[in-house]
């Protein structure tokens, strides 16, 4: 049976950076479920589907085939056969993903794919509903969070480093709006699983969070050792 770690938390808490590093150190695969919702959103945006129209999203989602492959240890997302990795990380696709992810038919399709991946390999999977819904029996559950001020500042620095002009207050407002949507939707809202360990990264460096997570993953018999 595979060893699974569920990492949930709000946008910008550092889940993907941390989970990717921990997976590498522990020799597990990293499954980024947000990118699956982003690929679904990209399909809807390209097709001009109204993102307020849940019925239309549900209907169109039947035409979407999302496949995950690991190439040189990196997760590659194929949308109807096209490698879309480079197109998924924009703010526009992230916001569209938040809307698309509230639709039951979308979640049903992607949760099935996520559970299949987890049954095949030892993995660290990050998202919003991994500990509560996708892998309720995960071997370890972590809820990684940080204040919205800290998350907005990190995002601002990331974008500025890429040479993009951006506004800190707007980024913070977007983050808080996305948190609200993700936490208040009807299906699988973002929330800490009762048995998840809370890890607040607001005052920690990336290395400190990675170490904390590795300790959590390795503290019982049968867990992978770094
Ligand atoms: O983690 P991310 O920013 O790449 O996720 C994009 C959106 O997808 C996010 O707003 C919420 C949604 N999502 C979800 O509902 N469930 C998941 N397991 C992962 C992401």
Image: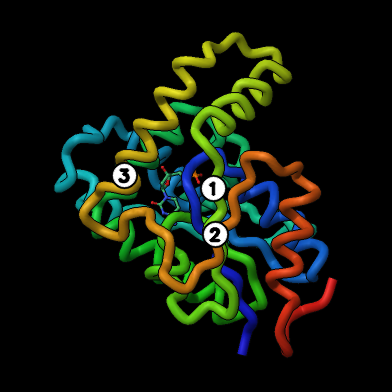
Give me the disc on residue 198. Answer: 2
**Residue at horizontal 46%, vertical 65%?**
130
Quote the CA–CA distance across marks 2 and 3.
27 Å
Does the CB distance between marks 2 and 1 fall below 8 Å? Answer: yes
**Residue at horizontal 77%, vertical 50%?**
208
The picture places residue 114, in percent across and down from the top left corner, at 48, 68
Q: Secondary structure at mark 1?
A: strand
Crowding around mark 3 (Cα neighbors within 10 Å: few <14, some 14 to 19, many 20+) is: many
Q: Nearer the viewer, residue 192 or 187?
A: 192
Can residue 46 be seen in the rendering of this structure? no
Name the residue tied to disc 3.
100
Quote the CA–CA distance across marks 2 and 1.
8 Å
Q: Secondary structure at mark 2?
A: strand
Nearer the observer: mark 3 or 1; the answer is 1
Name the residue tied to disc 1.
145
Q: In this rendering, would 32 be left or right of 223?
A: left
Q: In this rendering, would 206 be left or right of 83?
A: right
């Amino acid at each position: 049976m595979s060893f699974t770690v569920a990492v949930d938390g709000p946008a910008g808490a550092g889940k993907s950076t941390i989970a990717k590093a921990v997976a590498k150190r522990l020799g597990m695969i990293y499954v980024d479920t947000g990118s699956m919702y982003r690929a679904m959103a990209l399909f809807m945006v390209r097709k001009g589907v109204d993102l307020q129209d849940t019925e239309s999203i549900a209907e169109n989602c039947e035409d979407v085939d999302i496949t995950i492959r690991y190439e040189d240890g990196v997760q590659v997302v194929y949308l109807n056969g096209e490698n879309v990795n480079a197109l998924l990380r924009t703010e526009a696709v992230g916001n569209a993903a938040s809307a698309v992810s509230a639709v039951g038919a979308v979640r049903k399709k992607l949760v099935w794919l996520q559970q299949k991946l987890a049954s095949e390999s030892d993995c660290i999977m990050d998202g919003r509903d991994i500990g509560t819904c996708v892998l309720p029996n995960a071997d370890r559950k972590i809820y990684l969070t940080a204040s919205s001020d800290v998350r907005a500042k990190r995002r601002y620095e990331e974008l500025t480093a890429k040479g993009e002009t951006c506004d800190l207050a707007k980024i913070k407002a977007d983050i808080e709006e996305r948190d609200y949507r993700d936490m208040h939707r009807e299906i699988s809202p973002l929330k800490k699983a009762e048995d998840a360990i809370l890890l607040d990264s607001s005052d920690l460096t990336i290395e400190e969070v990675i170490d904390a997570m590795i300790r959590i993953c390795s503290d019982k018999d049968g867990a992978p050792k770094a």
